[in-house]
Amino acid sequence: MNCETCHLNELELEPLEIKDVLRCILHTIFFHRTLTLVRPKDVDCDLFEITYVQCGLAELEKEVDEKINQFIAWAEKHPNRKSQVCLSFFDEKNKHPGWFSSKTERVYWEQWFINLHVTSPKGQGKSRGSKAPANTKGQALEETSSRRDALSLLIQEVLFQIINYANEKKDHIPPISDRIFNHEILVPR
C-alpha cells in the first residue's frame, strides 16, 4: 500500500497564533478524512475571520489540544524556527502471527505535513522604556492587523489545499471503518 503525502504551504505565524492555526488545520483534515458518522460542529477562530468544522468528538478535540500544547512548549524553547507537525493515518496489520505473539505493524496510508515558521512578534525584546509615542503604538497595532489579515488569507489557501487534496486523493484510503481512522500527530520534541 502506498503512503500518500501532502505538504501544506508554509505559514509564518507568531506564538500567540499557533493554537488557532493548528486547531483549524488539524480539525479540517480530520473532518475530511473521517468516514464514520459524526456531529459536525462549526468553530470560529479567535484571531482570524475563519470558521472551520470539527468532528464533534471530545476525545479527538482533547488529543488535538494536547499535541498543540506540546508544540507551543517546543516553540517557546526554540524561537524563530521553522518546524513541521505531521498528521499520519495508518492501518495496523499483524506482522507475523504466531501462537504466542501478536505483533502488529503500522502501515501508513496518508501523511499531512503542516509547515510552520514561528517568529517572534515585531518589537518584542526592544524595550527601552514603557513610554512609546501614541502614533508608534497605533502603527504597531495597524501592522499586526494587516499581518493577521494576510495570514488569514494564507490559512484559507491551506484550507482549500486540504479540501482539494482530500477530494482528489481517495484511492489509497482503506475500506470504511466504523470509527475514526488510526492516526498519530507528531510534533517536534
Image (cartoon, rainbow, N blue to C red):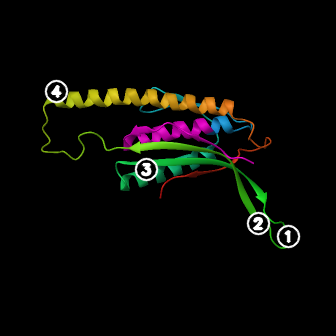
Q: Position of residue 120 (x, y in %)?
A: 31, 44
Which residue is under mark 3?
A: 72
Q: Is residue 20 magenta?
A: yes
**Identity of the amino acid at label 3?**
Ile
Which residue is under mark 1?
A: 98
Residue 135 got which mark? 4
Q: In the image, is 6 to the left or to the right of 100?
A: left
Q: In the image, is 153 to the left or to the right of 34?
A: left
- N-terminal label among 4 and 3: 3
Q: Which residues are magenta?
A: 1-29
Front: mark 4 or 2: 2
Which residue is under mark 2?
A: 103
* Residue 17 in which image quadrant: top left
> Dot 4 lies on which element?
helix
Rendered position, 28 above or below 96? above
**Spatial distance from mark 4 to mark 2, Cα to Cα?**
65 Å
